[in-house]
Structure formats: C-alpha cells, structure tokens
Image (tube, grey):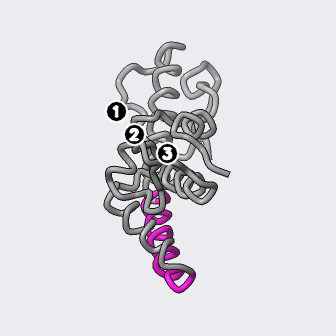
Amino acid sequence: MQYSIKEVSQLLNIPTSTIRYYDAQSLLPYVSRTQGGYRVFTQEDIHILQTITALKSLGMPIKDIRQFVGWMAQGPETLPHREKMILAYRQELEELVAQSLQRLHFIERMTWFYTCAAEGGPTDIREYANIDPSYCGPCDFFSPGSSSDHE
C-alpha cells in the first residue's frame, strides 16, 4: 500500500514539514516520487519514520539518527552497532535520571525546611545542619515536647 505525505502525517501525527525535513536530511532512503514529484510512502517508510520519531524523543541528534537509519538499511549485520548506540543513550538517560533524583531530593529537603519554618521552627536553614539528611518526616523537631534526635 502507498501513502501520500498528508496521509502519513495524519497517521503518525507528524507535521508534513517535519517529514519533508527528514527526507531532505536523507533519513528516508526509500521514499519514491510520482512523475509529478510528490512523495510516495510505503509501510517500510512509515516504520522508518516511527523509528526516527522514537530516536528523536531520546534527544538523538539528526547525524546520529542518519547513522542509525543507515545501519538499518544495511541489514541485520549492523545490529551490534545499533545496540551499542542505543545503550550509550540509555547510559546518558540513566545519568540524567540520577541527577534529577538528586535535585528532587534537594527540593524535598527544602520544602520540608520551609514547611517546618512556617509551622514555627527555625527560619535559619543553618539550624537544620545537624539533622539526619535522610529524615524528611513531619515537622515536629521544634514542637514542645518533641525529641530532636530522629534516628
């Protein structure tokens, strides 16, 4: 079955301008044209576009996507190259997740501090310096009768 650029755009929810850009960047090696110059897409082209979209969502630059699509065109003997590239992006993503988790923990600690301060605890963050950093429980450190060692 063959599809027009408009049909592919609607099917994949990709703007036609993006599809044209990918074609101009040599990411769609098999797209043919009618005698009138219109692009004609096959199911294989749609599969490649889905792959490009997935790789783009990883933050992969066009040059790397071009390499990946080139390896796809070369066949199964390039599977190790493709796997290595995807694993490299996985490693980058894992590092970003770890950094994001550190930032999230910091935000949780700061939120906890400001909540405690708003509830009558110290307003100078230096007074929290000796509190176990893994503790992010209720703001009872400075309530009357509360214990300040939360171990």
Main secondary structure found in the magenta portion: helix
Q: Secondary structure at mark 1?
A: helix
Pick the residue in front: 59 or 51.
Answer: 51
Pointer 3: what residue?
A: 133
Pointer 1: what residue?
A: 126
Q: Secondary structure at mark 3?
A: loop
Residue drawn at the location 49% of the way across and 13% of the way down = 118
Residue drawn at the location 43% of the way across and 62% of the way down = 29
- Residue that protrudes farthest toward the front in the picture: 35
Tell me the magenta residue range. 76-94
Whether pointer 1 and pointer 2 mark residues with C-beta atoms closer than 8 Å, the reply is yes
* Amino acid type at image mark 2: Ala
Crowdedness of circle 1 by 10 Å Cα count: few (<14), some, many (20+)? few
Residue drawn at the location 68% of the way across and 52% of the way down = 1
Pointer 2: what residue?
A: 129
Count the labels in the image: 3
**For the residues marked 2 and 3, what is the alpha-carbon distance in whole angstroms?**
8 Å
- Looking at the rendered image, the disc whose residue lies closer to the viewer, 2 or 3, is 3
**For the residues marked 1 and 3, what is the alpha-carbon distance in whole angstroms?**
13 Å
